[in-house]
Image: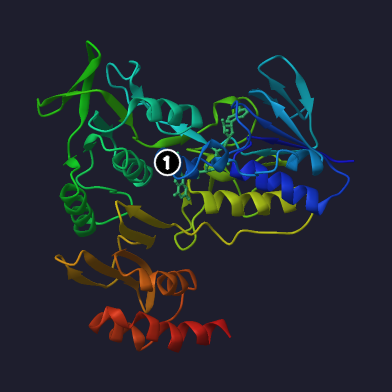
Amino acid sequence: MTRHVIIGNGPAGVVAAETLRRADAAAEITLIGDEAEPPYSRMAIPYLLMGQIDEAGTYLRKNAEHFERLRIRMLRGRVEAIDSGARSLRLADGQLLPYDRLLIASGAQPVRPPVPGIDLPKVWSCWTLADARMIAAGIGRGVRVLQMGAGFIGCIIMESLAARGPQLTVVEMGDRMVPRMLDAVAGAMLRRWCEARGVRVLTGRRVVAIAAAGEALRVQLDDGETLEVDALISATGVRPNIAFLYGSGVAVDAGVLVDASMQTSVAGIYAAGDVAEAVEFGTGLRVVNAIQPDAVEQARVAALHMAGQPAVLPGTFVFNILDTLGLISASFGQWQGVAGGESVQLLDEAGFRYLRLAFDGDRLVGANCIGHTEHIGVLRGLIQGQVRLGEWKDRLLANPLQLSEAYLARGLAMAH
Ligand SMILES: Cc1cc2nc3c(=O)[nH]c(=O)nc-3n(C[C@H](O)[C@H](O)[C@H](O)COP(=O)(O)OP(=O)(O)OC[C@H]3O[C@@H](n4cnc5c(N)ncnc54)[C@H](O)[C@@H]3O)c2cc1C
């Protein structure tokens, strides 16, 4: 009987455990998590903060007996070290747990920037259910809030904070909002949209110090401006939870390095989700693509492999859709464009609509858009399918709105 152990009970860990059970009825499956809650989805936290669901609504599986029924052993504890030679891991309470196959699905944690005062009370992350409880208790109508960071997750958090009615200021050190997902035109449009909805947005600025000022916080920015706020939300990015792997022989870079079957440098040890650094589709570069659909797909592939079934991931496709206070933006693949490649853009400033397509030869390799939600599926199909556009490339350069026609003419032809 194979002993499977999974470190981390977020979406990646849960889907891996369920996939393993489907693939092997007899296997022993242990799912280890270090948070006090039943397995839940961080993605659901914004809906909790907006009052659309309660805490139970964030749980990944709603039936309390779900894991017991699948004979998945749930273990609360923190893994501190892995001995890959002895095939065992050590928990914080000293317990040793042997395994035959191991999955690292330990996710990521928020980066705490090295700013004086970052550890003061009322400086919060928005990453766990425990964080969400503090935010829900402390942030309501009229409360003065400064959010540090306006990246992908930062914008999602901002939307849920804004719904609570605070006086909100967002400080982003990049020259625009969501700089790792949107180009300058799109980033500026998003900023204009947020400002029109009452959020003060400061880009190209940094928080350099935070100090207690009675019940409030005094926040100093790099240009000398000082703001007094009641709470500060730190949303400056995340980093994979890999510290416990030192000495295990598992190769890491920013995250745990995996191959197409999600296996690490050590045979029998796999990784999936926010902790994994996989090969990016299209560029062949390694990326940590910390979004839930990727976490789940990687977990499924890893689990099938652990159960001895062939499965590979053709590469992580970097694709993000963001809803910021009702404005939908999206980025696909190599949206920045490639050297020597052509690009075209369509801009409607007043209507908050923007579309920019990036080509490499006669293939579409990336795109940015705001609005244009009707094209999202087709954009993904053309880019991920690496469709050769032939004469349709020039037609798209002349009129980027002919995306659906191009897909019907070329994409579907390639699919058959
Ligand atoms: C506010 C917010 C909104 C988001 N919105 C979106 C969205 O709209 N779309 C999207 O795709 N993604 C979104 N995400 C990101 C998404 O939540 C993550 O990609 C997803 O949670 C990754 O799943 P995971 O299982 O890899 O990691 P996690 O969900 O982080 O789960 C890992 C678990 O392992 C535990 N763990 C870590 N180390 C150890 C250890 N040593 N021992 C035991 N347990 C350990 C962790 O505490 C955690 O419980 C959002 C995230 C946040 C915070």
Q: What residue is drawn where x is 29% and y is 80%?
A: 401
Residue 372 place in picture, x, y as percent:
31, 70
Q: Quadrant of residue 374?
A: bottom left
What's the residue at 63%, 33% (across, down)?
A: 38
Residue 237's place in the image compared with 282, above or below, is: above
Looking at the image, can residue 389 be seen?
no
Three-letter code for the amino acid on which mark 1 is drawn: Gly
Residue 171 drawn at (x, y percent): 22, 36
Place of residue 397 in the rendered image (x, y in percent of width and height, measured from the top left): 26, 80
Q: Which residue is at the front of the view, 365 or 285? A: 365
Foreground pick, 69 / 243? 69
Mark 1 Cβ and ligand 1 under 8 Å apart = no
Quadrant of the rendered image containing residue 404? bottom left
Check the picture and name the quadrant holding the C terminus. Answer: bottom right
- Residue highlighted by disc 1: 51
In this view of the protein, can residue 154 be seen by the observer? Answer: yes
> Who's the residue at 49% across and 27% down the image?
130
The N terminus lies in quadrant: top right
Q: Farthest residue in the top direction?
A: 214
- The 10 Å Cα crowd at callout 1, few under 14, some 14 to 19, many 20 or more, is some
